[in-house]
Image (tube, coloured by chain):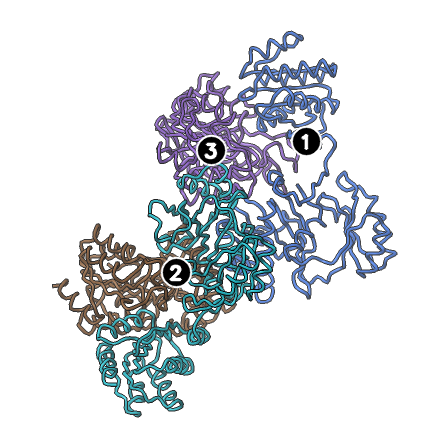
Chain colours: A purple, B brown, C cyan, D blue
Amino acid sequence: MSIYINDKTRVLVQGITGNQGSFHTGQMLKYGTNIVGGVSPGKGGQEVEGVPVYNTVFEAVENEQAEASILFIPAPFAKDAALEALAAGIKILVLIPEHIPLQDAMDIMAQAKRHEAVVVGPNTFGLVSSGACKIGIMPNQYFVPGPVGVVSRSGTLCYEIVGHLTESKIGTTTVVGLGGDRVVGLDFIDVLEQFEKDPETKTVVLVGEIGGSAEEEAAAYIKSSMSKPVVAYLAGKSAPPGKRMGHAGAIIERGRGTFESKVEALNAAGVDVADLPGKVPELVKTKLA
Amino acid sequence: MSIYINDKTRVLVQGITGNQGSFHTGQMLKYGTNIVGGVSPGKGGQEVEGVPVYNTVFEAVENEQAEASILFIPAPFAKDAALEALAAGIKILVLIPEHIPLQDAMDIMAQAKRHEAVVVGPNTFGLVSSGACKIGIMPNQYFVPGPVGVVSRSGTLCYEIVGHLTESKIGTTTVVGLGGDRVVGLDFIDVLEQFEKDPETKTVVLVGEIGGSAEEEAAAYIKSSMSKPVVAYLAGKSAPPGKRMGHAGAIIERGRGTFESKVEALNAAGVDVADLPGKVPELVKTKLA
Amino acid sequence: MKLYEHLGKELFARYGITVPAGRVIENAGQAAEAASELGEVVIKSQVLTGKRGKAGGISFASSPEEAEAEAEKIFKMELGGFTADKLLVEEKIQIEQEIYLALTVDGTVRKPVVLASLDGGMDVEDVPEDRMIRWPVDVTVGMQGYMVREICRQMGVKGDLQKEFLKLLPKLYKMFRENDAELAEINPLALTPQGLVAADAKVTIDDDALYRHKELPRIKEKTALELKAEELDLAYVELDGEIAVMANGAGITMATLDMVQHYGGSPANFLDFGGGANIEKTSQALELLLGTNPKVLLINIFGGITRCDVVAEAFVRVRESKGIDLPVSFRLVGTNEAEGREILEKVGIKAFNSMDEAVSHAVELLNAS
Amino acid sequence: MKLYEHLGKELFARYGITVPAGRVIENAGQAAEAASELGEVVIKSQVLTGKRGKAGGISFASSPEEAEAEAEKIFKMELGGFTADKLLVEEKIQIEQEIYLALTVDGTVRKPVVLASLDGGMDVEDVPEDRMIRWPVDVTVGMQGYMVREICRQMGVKGDLQKEFLKLLPKLYKMFRENDAELAEINPLALTPQGLVAADAKVTIDDDALYRHKELPRIKEKTALELKAEELDLAYVELDGEIAVMANGAGITMATLDMVQHYGGSPANFLDFGGGANIEKTSQALELLLGTNPKVLLINIFGGITRCDVVAEAFVRVRESKGIDLPVSFRLVGTNEAEGREILEKVGIKAFNSMDEAVSHAVELLNAS
């Protein structure tokens, strides 16, 4: 079993003819992702990396029965493309772009809820079912099958930690990037629920950061509903309040979202928080043992 | 079994302190309807016919666990009240008012779909589970239990036909008024599906009229999916095209929605169409026999 | 409420939809003036009837003199029972292609629906089903670019024309929603060297929403009686038969008319005076009916919220004050039936129990008259 | 982007929200003029820092002379590191009650959320949880009357004050949505004999949506380096330590700062130069960093879409052109790692494999400097 996606998942690439779209289509195909089509208005009939291009998502879904879609669309046009995917019946929507306006993100999430679709991102590296299906932009080589589920708010930091796991010969079941924006689709709890149900996932790594209350809510969920061990790493211990640390969501405002409150909540839920990214594998090993 | 509502259904009256609201609260209570509360902004704390009045639907639902609501609210304020009921968790919403603007009706229906709620009307007499629960404004005495399900687009004509059935000692399971507007919540097919599933309903009477394509769609459904006999009466045989016959929906426009096309479709589905309202009981008797 | 073409086009223009340059004129002389400004023109009668063109209500002119002469002709023309007070004189546009585009309300899906076809200029009912694209718009989303692109794909529209649609459709949708339109039809939508131009405008505003559009004019292309009925908030339709019919409820009123015809009579009108009317309103409805000079009066009451005694009382009052002498057939059942019957009996009228009896009696009265 | 109070109030006024009569002034003399028009006034420094009042940035005056003297004082004041270019002089309003009202974005429910409390005037974090009403607004529905009535019920507001809220909240919501606000806070919202008046305005516009609000001014209350970083589209935050840090990705940059602190150093900045930057942009990021005069430079690259050779090449170029002589600790792994290392080795730098090594080395370099 795998969560959200697997080697059969029929994936579409929106914005496939752009630089990023075509490059990552190649990378995803190399990883083994079942990419069935691309969408690029006005470019229907072309091919990118052997993948047929359509003018609209409706056309692509009609012809290719796509279930998932990944967006490489500039932020000002991302809402339209996302709503199109949802209306056309896409059930897993991965929003790569950053700088999508907040109000647009809320509009997208409202429609996703209506259509009962899963949205990953925006401002995410995507998600990967290790060894089976990658819908995202992360470097292929670090995502090898194993017993650990990983869920993260940030990108490169997640690669860093997964890299440490790989060095320690620990592979992953699924790795999900929630995205660094203030309004994103999936949250920690959604993914933790899936990991809890997934028999292949034995231990979970949660990579959080300052700002918002997602980690505190995750801690409450872990305490009440999770039987599997969770290990965490949190970025932003040294960040001053009132400053956005790169991510829109990574800001300590009005005394909320501090590193300390998150660590406290996670510790209270029995979650060990690593003090350095490189310490995560050790903690995971103690849980797997 | 009964469809949509039964003697346990907890009913709210929105606009309970108005003339119509208070009068029909009394009538519904006499019929046996389980009215648990009323809503009238600014009048919370009062009582009408012994029923407690609240300021908001949220407050009423919180205190009385209401599941259904009937609206006696002037048309310009009906959308707000309907959206409130839906947001507060009401699952059966009966919209009595006529003259609700079309765009408002579409807004209401879009939200009803999201909340998975059933809307009856607008511009309806409501619905009644005979002998158990009346959520509407129809005269109590005609709605006695029996084996016939009735669904109608019009009000008084429906009473007329149910009156004929009553005279012939034929009672009803449930009687539903769809409402005379162009955009209404429940349609014939929704109700026919329920009647088909309801073991107590042996025969169905469909009261239609010119305009729109609801009867043609109902005919297609009856043909493909109904095992129970259906008898129909259609109003508007003598109506000239291009004129609205009282109901917003009762108009033959652009050659569509004619009496003839409806009779043809119903006949093709095996439905007998009575040529006079008074002939309905005879036809029903042949089906019940 | 249907808007005259020129009013529809004013609305379009307010939302940034391109319409031909034009002038509204009230006499033939102004047509000449307009033509001298606009050059080659088309002159269009401002009446609400369809098939205006086929009936001769649209004409072309290439000089001010010709425009004046044509305008004169059109002012005199009767179209669908009405003569025009105003004409619209417009520049003649260079049409490369005629397209059909409309927004209307689809009761089946309970949504606004876009209708679009490359077979513009034809009557909508004549466009083959598979050439007419139908796209229901989710009101919680509104008109988005992707919908336009998909509509274009289904129509077979690409490139620059698709770009024109991407600009036009959101404007039309905004106009439709914000003005409580039931119908906003552009037929033909003309593709010209300057882009898409709305060569015609059929806009219908929802009567029930007029109260929130004080800025819109009130169009009254109705008969005097229909206007009177509207004032009284009665659902009234003039027909050309001899039995005046009044009933309570749209469905039962229609059924009454049908039954009149069934028994060989002909109804003079449709009049649904609604539910729960008081004596005043019922009296006014009755007075309205008498204005049509019918031969027989048929009243069919199945009282729910309508009280039988109120109707009987109103009838007796109007009868006395106006001196009704035409034959009456009365059906009266339901709420306060006994009281109502008593009132009628005092003036010598025996009400029927059944609709059937009352209607067939009315037809007998007609045949005897 | 935070708006100055007077700009927020201009926005409010455009949406029909009542604000006190006021004038924006640029010198103390204008304060006297404004006071002679407005009578008793309040004078408010237009800076973006919170707690402006406690720091003395708000003053009252009952005569033009007094207003001028107070304005002079406030113009000289430094508040949160900035002095004000403009002051807002407003009529003093008669406040019967102070209310808190805000619209903000709640990431947990992914909706705009109304925050409302009768404990106005207090800092929002000081209002007890149970006295602060939170109401998430479904964007597919918008702000409806029923939501306002329910918010009022939960606040314990009735009658005329509820009517005021029924007018105010839909306007505030419209402003919030149409202007891509992240926050629209009115604290205090003053109940006066004339109704509700927005006595303050804190409005923050979503930076990512500024492109569609050409009509809004651009506020630049930032340090020179922060402004430069914004121009270059870099995520940059000035800190007060000694090790300049550059990394790719917000999370890993934060983690790098944390690790610097962990090993006893202090970071001079947060600089995430993003993913997939080219040589030009990488060079500009490096030049920016050197502008802070750090003692050590720490570069931490985990290359995904970022190519190691590009970063190394950019570093070498900037080093040569600018003559970087400060100690550098470089971590370089990922895409085109070998090529990148080779470039660095040519200039005598050996890149580390692990972040840990690179950071602890940077701290060693600092301690040795």
Amino acid carrying label 1: it is Glu
* D134 vs A210: above or below: below
Q: Which mark is residue D231?
A: 1
Using the numbered discs, state the Cα–Cα distance from disc 1 to disc 2 in whole angstroms.
57 Å
**Residue B5, image x and y in percent?**
30, 61
Under circle 1, the secondary element is helix
Mark 1 touches mark 2? (CB < 8 Å): no
Label 3, label 2: how many angstroms apart (C-alpha)?
52 Å
Task: Tell which tag, 1 or 2, sits nearer the viewer.
Answer: 1
Residue under disc 1 on the same chain as residue under disc 2: no
Foreground mark, 3 or 2?
3
Find residue C268 and name its label: none
Q: Is residue B202 above or below residue C305?
A: above
Label 1 marks a residue whose chain is D
Q: Amino acid at mark 3?
A: Gly
Residue B116 lies, in percent from the top left, at: 37, 51
Alpha carbon of mark 3 to alpha carbon of mark 1: how far?
Answer: 33 Å
Residue at mark 3: A42
* Residue at mark 3: chain: A
The quadrant in which the N terminus of chain D is found is top right
Regarding mark 2 in the picture, which secondary structure is present there? loop
Front residue of C22/D353: it is: C22
Disc 2 residue type (three-letter): Ala
Q: Is residue A41 left or right of residue D356?
A: left
> Mark 2 — residue?
B66
Instruction: Please say if A258 is above or below C123.
Output: above
Mark 3 and 1 residues: CB-CB less than 8 Å, in contact? no
